[in-house]
Structures are given as C-alpha cells and as structure tokens.
Image: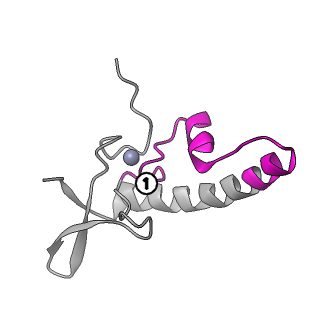
Amino acid sequence: MARGVPLTGEYLSRYLAAQKRWHEARERRSRETAAGRPSTYADFSRAHGLCSACAASGVSLNDNGVGFSTVEWNGNLPLYEECAACGGTGRIVSPS
Ligand SMILES: [Zn+2]
C-alpha cells in the first residue's frame, strides 16, 4: 500500500508551485498549438524534468484526474497517496 502523506509542508508548496506552473503550461500550450507544434502537458513536464503522473506535486492524482487519491485519514487530516512514479519528489526520476 502506498504511503499516505498530508498535503502540508513540502507537498503543499509543491502543489502550489505545480498549480502556478499549470497556468504557465496552459499558456505555453496555446502558443505551441497556435504555432502548429504538438504540445501536451506531458511534453511540458518532460521539458522541465517534472513528473507528469502527479503534475509535479508528489502526490498521486485521482484516477479521474480531479483532486488527489486519499489513502487514509489521520483524524480530520486526509493523507494522500505519495506518487510512486517519482517517489513524492515531483521530479522525473531517471533510471540509473
Ligand atoms: Zn510523481
């Protein structure tokens, strides 16, 4: 079972940074699309070394892509599933 992590501290700051980046990505994508170049969020993530599986937040997105997967609750605090693809770092882990 995946490790449950609270969306606080480093995860929260990564999540907020990812949201900001999401907006930049959207603008970049419209520019790229207008220029006739294929541009997906995955392309953007790759170009920046970011994990596209979790939108660089370090916590797994829900299967439907909306919100995060909750694995358990710590009282009132939801614990989210740490992204297995990047180990919760939000960055592409290069196989070495
Ligand atoms: Zn990830």
Is the CB of mark 1 within 8 Å of ligand 1?
yes
Name the amino acid type tagged 1: Ser
Residue at image coords 34%, 56%:
59
* Position of 81 relative to 88 (above/below): below
Circle 1 residue: 57
Q: Which residues are magenta?
A: 29-58
Query: In the displayed structure, does residue 60 sit left or right of residue 78?
Result: right
Q: How is the image coloured?
A: one colour
Q: Residues within 10 Å of mark 1 (few under 14, many from 20)?
A: many
Determine if the magenta segment contains residue 85: no
Determine if the magenta segment contains residue 35: yes
Residue 57, located in which quarter of the rendered image? bottom left
Q: Position of residue 22 (x, y in %)?
A: 61, 58
Query: In the displayed structure, does residue 24 sit left or right of residue 3?
Result: right
Q: Position of residue 18 (x, y in %)?
A: 53, 56
Query: In the displayed structure, does residue 23 sit left or right of residue 70?
Result: right
Residue at image coords 66%, 61%:
23
Q: Secondary structure at mark 1?
A: loop
Residue at image coords 41%, 62%:
12
Q: Quadrant of the C terminus?
A: top left
